[in-house]
């Protein structure tokens, strides 16, 4: 009987009764509270075997939720089940051995900050690619035994869950997460109380509890403001990921950056390197500065040397609008008092986030702040590194984009999380289990060439069947919920064919992803998908941000097209895109399609997951595919634009897609030998696995971060801290001296060839002698060079040649420099003499952004 509590005036209190397992099953509790189980195939299978009928639908792949629902009868059955207990002991033994391994002595300790983490379907702390990348990174850090701690926010509602109306409208749902069913535990202080940190907001203090989520060997500390001490407004700070307005975002980013550093300090966590994953966490640099200034009695300039020496900023967004900006008036309201603790005036602070420090109308950029407080900066693919250098050139006046220190590490994916069991079993059998610890070694992966085509296609067909079974079940449920007519539902399900070429397109629905290209010519599309001899199916999935009307309109259009009779069961949109759906898609489709506007795809990782599973990519040469593409491993749309008009470019790309599908991809897929195996298609699969996949495993990415950034930052960070920060103080003093004298440098003589009136021939040397009055600056700390540029447009110069001058004479404050350069180049170039400060302790040329052209 249901009781109406309001009418009965019943007063109820809440109590949490924690489930208890007998001692024999206690390892299940420990395994469930560490996300290691989610990427260990045997551990996941162990949990599934407890209640296979309800593991997916009822429990949502969540072992904690399942364990607390177990009946006493089922618990007793498990204890008496010898096969289950043997399985449990085996998994637990490996888990214990895994946790017992310690990081290599002396390895850098990394603090990793991110606004979102995509760790598992049951833990809604992510929205899309950025979060899943961060989640994969923590898993690989665990597998590689990296000394890392991570910081984020614990969201009560997470990112929205998507459903679709009968007419194709996206509906955003925010069901709450039950923290008791998540693998999170309170962090306790020395007195046993729940650890809390606080930050100051206008007129009040906001408190946050600290939780710990174990990701294998890695601790992820999550801040949560949803507690009674806070007002409702402040409690909602950790309710939604990317929810609320710009002011709400500012408060969240203060909590992540400032609060995150305070949490690590309260935990007494010592780190060598701070890795800022996107600009959301840039305020951590301010809190590190404040601590050094107030606790170590350092000046702002001295503290900045320490902070920069151990910070890495990774930018993921090639579109300027994708970076966070805040108006000065909003910042002043929230940070004015805080900035006073840094020992600088307000204008100097605001200048950290601007291109032009004197432009009061320019909004404050979190990415600019992160760059100015980080020694190292990187993009997330080779092409994105180039795009980032162009995007941030204005921060480094006097340098061309090609000269900037901004590097790159191409994103990758965590192999155990995304590989299908069928492929994993084949790889271990063929390559040997040792390849798992050396995943970027192609010598292992090339063993796939020895596998028979029939076996390759057997796996591919098994995974496609699993996908299509999932698609049928989900469509039946979703279309029924929407109120679709039974006949229409039957028509859709009946037209899904097992032998079709299945093409997947699943990602965030932003307009630059161009999901609409396929529908530019509906008549031609209908011909492609309705060929009885060579059937084709397209599966779409993805979310548009609730505020992105354009992205939602794209979803609506695809849903409406899918409802047309000629596209029933041929064009499918799956609602509720999440990590589990993504696994079915990247493992089960035949082609992974990606059509972003060039060059707006920073990296993209879904195609990498597909490659691991023998799926062939058809993508624009953008992001990772610009590095991964091979003509014998997939298909590509060119990177270069043909038209400046985007509409014309879209039209051309749409026609290219149709032609490539019709003339290359479809014939290759359906051309089979006597045994029914498409030999050329299998060749594409093998080449993908052997030559492409090893380059995009997270192990390679982790190694790259260490070699390119972490080791160097660890060394420099420790150096500037030694002997009471003497090196940091000395560098700061030197920089201040240079800045005070820089504009007083005077040019006494420039003796150089007159290129305005005389043309040169290839091989003619250019000699120059320059005499400078350095106003007290040591000549050894002045760099002088001649540089040659090729102009590629009104605003773009490409460096072609640079030659340093030699110091040939010094006479008090006067120094003479000489240079001879023989440019073996023909054509029109622009050249000049560039003066810059130099010091053996500067990590790179742009570390002190002073440049003069003579």
Image (spheres, rainbow, N blue to C red):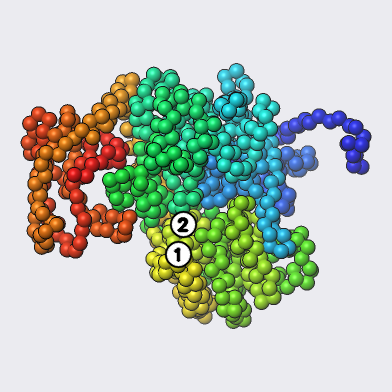
Could you say which quadrant of the image residue 348 lies in?
top left
Question: Few, some or many C-alpha atoms within 10 Å of disc 2 (few <14, some 14-19, many ≥20)?
Answer: many
Eyeballing the image, is 53 above or below 453?
above
Could you say which quadrant of the image residue 222 lies in?
top right
Q: Earlier in the sequence, mark 2 or mark 1?
A: 2
* Most foreground residue, 47 or 637: 637
Label 1, secondary structure: give it: strand
- Tell me, yes or no, if residue 23 can be seen here: no
The residue under label 2 is 601
* 733 horizontally vs 621: left or right: left
- Tell me, yes or no, if residue 121 can be seen here: yes
* 234 horizontally vs 325: left or right: right
Identify which residue is drawn at 89% across, 32% down: 10
The answer to whether the residue labelled 2 contacts the one labelled 1, judged by CB atoms less than 8 Å apart, is yes
* 650 horizontally vs 821: left or right: right
Q: Quadrant of the C terminus?
A: top left
Label 2, secondary structure: give it: loop
Identify which residue is drawn at 36% across, 40% down: 376
The residue under label 1 is 620
């Amino acid at each position: 009987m249901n009781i109406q509590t309001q009418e009965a005036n019943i007063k109820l209190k809440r109590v949490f009764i924690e489930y208890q397992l007998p001692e024999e099953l206690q390892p299940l509790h420990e395994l469930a509270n560490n996300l290691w189980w989610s990427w260990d195939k045997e551990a996941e299978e162990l949990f599934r075997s407890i209640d296979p009928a309800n593991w997916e639908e009822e429990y949502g792949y969540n072992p904690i939720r399942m364990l607390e629902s177990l009946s006493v009868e089922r618990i007793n059955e498990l204890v008496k089940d010898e096969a289950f207990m043997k399985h449990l002991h085996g998994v637990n033994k490996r888990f214990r051995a895994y946790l017992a391994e310690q990081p290599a002595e002396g390895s850098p300790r990394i603090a990793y900050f991110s606004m979102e983490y995509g760790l598992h379907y049951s833990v809604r702390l992510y929205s899309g690619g950025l979060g899943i990348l961060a989640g994969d990174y923590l898993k690989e850090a665990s597998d590689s035994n990296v000394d890392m701690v991570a910081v984020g926010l614990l969201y009560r509602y997470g990112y929205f869950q998507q459903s679709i109306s009968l007419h194709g409208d996206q509906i955003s749902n925010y069901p709450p997460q039950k923290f008791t069913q998540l693998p999170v535990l309170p962090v306790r202080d020395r007195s046993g109380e729940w650890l809390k940190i606080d930050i100051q907001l206008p007129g009040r203090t906001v408190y946050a509890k600290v939780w710990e989520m174990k990701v294998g060997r890695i601790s992820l500390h999550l801040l949560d403001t949803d507690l009674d001490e806070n007002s409702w407004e402040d409690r909602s700070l950790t309710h939604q990921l990317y929810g609320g307005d710009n002011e709400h975002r500012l408060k969240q980013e203060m909590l992540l950056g400032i609060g995150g550093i305070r949490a690590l300090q309260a935990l007494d966590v010592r780190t060598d390197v701070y890795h800022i994953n996107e600009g959301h966490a840039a305020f951590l640099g301010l809190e590190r500065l404040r601590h050094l200034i107030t606790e170590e009695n350092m000046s702002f300039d001295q503290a900045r040397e320490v902070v920069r020496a151990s910070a890495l900023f990774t930018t993921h967004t090639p579109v300027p609008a994708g970076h966070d900006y805040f108006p000065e008036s909003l910042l002043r309201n929230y940070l004015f008092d805080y900035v006073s603790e840094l020992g600088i005036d307000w204008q100097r602070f605001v200048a950290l986030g601007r291109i032009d420090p004197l432009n009061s109308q320019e909004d404050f950029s979190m990415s600019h702040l992160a760059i100015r407080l980080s020694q190292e900066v990187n993009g997330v693919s080779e092409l994105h590194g180039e795009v980032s250098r162009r995007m941030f050139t204005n921060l480094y006046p006097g340098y061309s984009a090609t000269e900037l220190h901004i590097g790159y590490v191409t994103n990758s994916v965590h192999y155990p999380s995304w590989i299908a069991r069928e492929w994993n079993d084949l790889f271990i059998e063929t390559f040997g289990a040792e390849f798992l610890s050396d995943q970027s070694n192609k010598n292992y992966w090339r063993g796939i060439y020895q596998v028979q085509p029939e076996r390759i296609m057997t796996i591919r067909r098994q995974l496609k069947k699993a996908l299509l079974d999932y698609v049928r079940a989900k469509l039946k449920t979703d279309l029924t919920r929407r109120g679709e007519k039974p006949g229409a539902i039957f028509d859709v399900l009946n037209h899904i064919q097992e032998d079709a070429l299945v093409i997947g397109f699943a990602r965030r629905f932003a307009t630059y992803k161009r999901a609409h290209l396929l529908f530019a010519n509906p008549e031609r599309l209908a011909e492609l998908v309705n060929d009885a001899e060579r059937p084709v199916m397209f599966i779409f999935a993805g979310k548009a941000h609730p505020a992105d009307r354009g992205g939602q309109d794209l979803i609506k259009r695809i849903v409406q097209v899918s409802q047309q009779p000629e596209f029933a069961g041929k064009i499918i949109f799956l609602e509720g895109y999440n990590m589990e759906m993504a696994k079915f898609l990247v493992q089960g489709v035949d082609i992974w399609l990606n059509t972003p506007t060039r060059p707006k795809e920073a990296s993209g990782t879904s195609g990498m997951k597909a490659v691991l599973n023998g799926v062939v990519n058809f993508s624009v040469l953008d992001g990772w595919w610009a590095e991964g593409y091979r003509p014998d491993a997939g298909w590509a749309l060119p990177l270069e634009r043909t038209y400046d008009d985007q509409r014309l470019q879209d039209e051309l790309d749409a026609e290219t897609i149709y032609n490539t599908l019709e003339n290359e991809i479809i014939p290759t897929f359906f051309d089979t030998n006597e045994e029914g195996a498409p030999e050329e298609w299998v060749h594409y699969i093998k080449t993908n696995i052997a030559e492409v996949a090893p380059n995009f495993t997270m192990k390679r990415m982790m190694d790259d971060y260490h070699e390119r950034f972490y080791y160097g930052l660890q060394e420099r960070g420790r150096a500037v801290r030694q002997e009471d920060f003497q090196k940091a103080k000395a560098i700061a003093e030197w920089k201040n001296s240079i800045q005070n004298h820089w504009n007083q440098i005077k040019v006494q003589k420039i003796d150089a060839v007159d290129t305005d009136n005389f043309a040169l021939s290839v091989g003619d040397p250019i000699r120059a002698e320059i005499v400078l009055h350095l106003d007290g600056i040591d000549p050894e700390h002045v760099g002088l060079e001649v540089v040659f540029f090729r102009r590629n447009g009104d605003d773009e110069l490409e460096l072609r040649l640079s030659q340093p001058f030699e110091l040939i004479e010094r006479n008090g404050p006067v120094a003479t420099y000489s240079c001879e350069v023989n440019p073996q180049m023909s054509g029109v170039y622009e050249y000049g003499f560039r003066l810059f400060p130099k010091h053996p302790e500067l990590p790179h040329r742009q570390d002190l952004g002073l440049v003069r052209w003579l």
